[in-house]
Amino acid sequence: MLQSWRWYGPDDPVLLDHARQAGATGIVSALTHVPVGEVWNAPEIALRKSQIEQAGLRWDVVESVPVHPTIKAGADDAEKHIEAYKTSIKNLAANGLHTICYNFMPVLDWTRTDLRFPAPNGGLSLRFDPVDFAAYDIHILQRHGAEGDYCDDTRLAAEERVHGLTAADVAVLEKTIIAGLPGAELSHDRKRLRENLAMFDGVDHAQLHRHLVAFLNEVVPVAESVGSRLCIHPDDPPIPLFGLPRVVSTIDDYRALTKAIPSLANGITFCTGSLGARPDNDLAAIAGEFADRIHFAHLRNVKRGPYGDFFESDHLGGDVDMVAILRILLREEQRRRGADSADVEIPMRPDHGHLLLDDQTKETYPGYSAIGRLKGLAELRGVICALQSDPSVLAAE
Ligand code: DNO
């Protein structure tokens, strides 16, 4: 597997040199300064690429080229943003960049409710609590109809929780949920969030799926024509939020998506942490069924709680059987080797890391600490080495 590391660009407090010291050879990066929906032009792509190469690394994966909200909402002016997307795919390919991650989550990209949750070993981790989320949605945002989107237990717990929040707690919770975590496409304030939610009025699961298929029908042939692979990131968390549907959360979603667009250029970013937040997701089954279209892997673990809550646990220490997943990915690489595929090695990155040691006093992007990710990558590398050194492990059913 290609061991890679997400780098947010020249403003990232974790430097390329740190990625190299952590043992990564590849970089995952994006032009986050380009407004969502606009073309990534070739000179800007070339500049980022040369910054990475000057540090002795290679830009392996583009994460993400964001999909403009009008495309997700199926709005009238989606077409011009789709055209821009096609041009970006071509410009990236012209610079040798062929693996492109994106997501199709409406309004919010990934989200959490707590960015400094103490993990059992004292490291600080990211956590999602549906009660906090409901407290925000029903009582602070006061979204019309929000009560109806939660079960009785969550609604009652949310009501109780909101009474215990100070104004400062509310401000922190709001910022955590809607201000945009790193890599998120849009940062919202309350007014903007309401406007964006309104764009999706009446868009249900089936409709959002149709918008995704319509988008892919346009861009997948372009990706194919330049030898590129798109890989959709699953919903994080993989549940509806703010009453909006999410269409990349379950094995059925993947089946519908790949049935509609069978091309392998309609690929997957296999994110163990996102999919693992749902107890009804069998990750080994998903990885096994769609192995040939996994073009990128995010490796992270979660420890699920009793009521839909979860926190990001050690990379090898949560509810996801990371060794089993790595075995599936390595076996898929072996299959590709035998089939003479162009993309034998699957790029992976340690997704997120705890705040450990000096990380806790430094300014870092939530989830993207230096030491926490270094530890995660080291652990994953250990598993990969062990599995690779034993051919019988890879061969076993
Ligand atoms: C979170 C990330 C996401 C991801 C995008 C992909 O850490 O996995 O921001 O990059 O959702 O489009």
Image: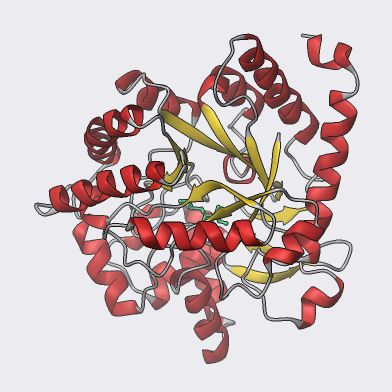
On the question of residue 120 being in view, the answer is yes
Name the residue rendered at 76%, 33% in the picture.
Answer: 321
Name the residue rendered at 54%, 46% in the picture.
Answer: 61
Give residue 349's position: percent from left, percent from top. Answer: 67, 47
On the question of residue 108 being in view, the answer is no
Residue 390 left/right relative to 99:
right
Q: Quadrant of the C terminus?
A: top right
Given the current orientation, which residue lies at the most extreme left position? 76
Q: Quadrant of the N terminus?
A: top right
Q: Does residue 278 lie above or below 67 as drawn?
A: above
Q: Which of 368 and 333 is in front in this view?
A: 333
Q: Does residue 296 lie above or below 39 as drawn?
A: above
Name the residue rendered at 31%, 71% in the picture.
Answer: 193
Q: Does residue 129 lie above or below 379 as drawn?
A: below
Residue 276 left/right relative to 361:
left
Q: Does residue 301 lie above or below 182 as drawn?
A: above
| Quarter of the figure with residue 327 | top right
Give residue 391's position: percent from left, percent from top. Answer: 86, 14
Give residue 242's position: percent from left, percent from top. Answer: 37, 59
